[in-house]
Image (tube, rainbow, N blue to C red):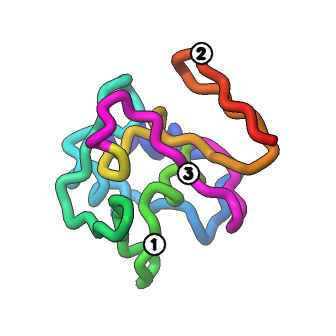
């Protein structure tokens, strides 16, 4: 499984954000599998912070980081500091706990977002 994830990582992922084999093994251990192969939610079974939303802290390079941001940067695309992520899980109770990278989209104001189900959200 780890080899498959390594092969799926973006070639141009910044080196300071690149998940190592050890990091990927930790993620697999907490999710029970590969994080992008189905439409099903893949739930994190480790500690989840609950403020207003669910939030997964992941120790990366000696610091706490937002796991979903690391996953997005490693497997989907560039993410700026002012970008934020939205979960498009069909089961609303899984939002913030799901690690399926197909359920995470980047959201920016003044951009339209196309969801996998064909819906489009327009921003002014």
- Categorize mark 2 by other alpha carbons within 10 Å: few (<14), some (14-19), many (20+): few
What is the CA distance from the residue labelled 3 to the residue labelled 2?
A: 18 Å
| Count of numbered badges drawn on the protein | 3
Quarter that holds the N terminus: top left
Callouts 1 and 2 close, C-beta under 8 Å = no
Q: Nearer the viewer, mark 1 or mark 2?
A: 2
Q: Which mark is residue 65?
A: 1
- Taking the spot 81% from the left edge, 42% from the top edge, the residue there is 124
**Corner quadrant of residue 14:** bottom right
Q: Secondary structure at mark 3?
A: strand
Q: Secondary structure at mark 1?
A: strand
Q: Position of residue 49 (x, y in %)?
A: 29, 69
What is the CA distance from the residue labelled 1 to the residue labelled 3?
A: 14 Å
Magenta stretch in the rendered image: 76-94
Q: Which residue is mark 3?
A: 85
Q: Which mark is residue 118?
A: 2
């Amino acid at each position: 499984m780890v080899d498959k994830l390594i092969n799926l990582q973006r070639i141009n992922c910044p080196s300071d954000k690149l998940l190592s084999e050890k990091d990927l093994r930790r993620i697999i251990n907490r999710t029970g599998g590969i994080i992008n192969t189905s439409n099903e939610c893949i739930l994190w079974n480790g500690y989840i912070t609950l403020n207003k939303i669910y939030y997964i802290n992941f120790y990366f390079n000696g610091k706490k980081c937002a796991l979903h941001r690391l996953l997005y940067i490693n497997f989907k695309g560039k993410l700026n500091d002012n970008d934020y992520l939205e979960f498009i899980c069909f089961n609303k109770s899984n939002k913030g706990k799901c690690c399926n990278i197909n359920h995470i989209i980047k959201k920016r104001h003044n951009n339209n977002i196309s969801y996998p189900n064909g819906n489009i959200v327009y921003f002014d």
